[in-house]
Image (cartoon, rainbow, N blue to C red):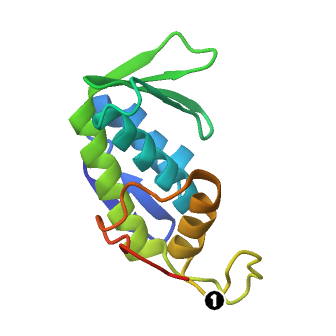
């Protein structure tokens, strides 16, 4: 899967119709939410390590069922479904996280932030995610610091 970045944000290359479900889930449902991306990364990690036999996610339109061999995308009210290999989804999600860090990890000076305005968005949302869920399993990987911020 290929992504492009323009003034509107991150988009996915729609040249291959097979990429529609995964691409629209990443740029639409996960979007610019570091919290949603952290939750998706955690679910993928939990299935990959066997901590969970299946992880179900819904951040908006797509219902996503993550299993060790594959990931199935469905949408409520639609008879359509798309299945990807587990590794395809993990790779695309990790690439998307890297793009978020690189292109969306800033604060808008015109916006008042209530959660840790002293930190870049990714780290504020990481701390928020960890308050509810415990230490994130991707700490030390993909640019997520092993420790901190405090």
**Residue 100's spot in the image, x, y percent?**
42, 66
Taking depth in this image into account, of 2 and 86 the one nearest to the observer is 86
Taking depth in this image into account, of 126 and 98 the one nearest to the observer is 126
**Residue 143's spot in the image, x, y percent?**
32, 72
Is residue 99 shown above or below 74?
below
**Residue 65's spot in the image, x, y percent?**
45, 25
Is residue 73 shown above or below 47?
above
Tell me the quarter of the picture where residue 103 sits.
bottom left
Q: Quadrant of the N terminus?
A: top left
Is residue 1 shown above or below 139?
above
Kind of element beneath mark 1: loop
Left or right: 71 as drawn, with respect to 130: left
**Residue 144's spot in the image, x, y percent?**
37, 70
Left or right: 27 as drawn, with respect to 15: right
Q: Can you identify the residue that label 1 sits on?
A: 118
Name of the residue lying farthest toward the top: 79
Residue drawn where x is 31% and y is 54% of the image: 94
Residue drawn where x is 37% and y is 21% of the image: 82
């Amino acid at each position: 899967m290929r992504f492009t970045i323009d003034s509107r944000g991150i988009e996915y290359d729609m040249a291959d119709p097979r990429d529609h479900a995964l691409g629209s889930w990443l740029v639409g449902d996960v979007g610019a939410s570091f919290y949603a991306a952290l939750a998706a990364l955690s679910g993928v990690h939990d299935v990959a390590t066997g901590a969970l036999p299946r992880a179900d996610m819904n951040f908006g339109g797509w219902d996503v069922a993550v299993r060790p061999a594959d990931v199935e995308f469905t949408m409520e009210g639609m008879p359509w479904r798309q299945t990807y290999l587990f590794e395809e989804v993990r790779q695309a999600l990790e690439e998307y996280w890297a793009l978020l860090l690189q292109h969306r990890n800033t604060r808008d000076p015109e916006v008042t932030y209530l959660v840790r305005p002293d930190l870049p968005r990714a780290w504020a949302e990481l701390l928020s995610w960890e308050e509810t869920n415990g230490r994130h399993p991707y700490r030390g990987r993909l640019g997520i610091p092993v420790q901190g911020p405090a």
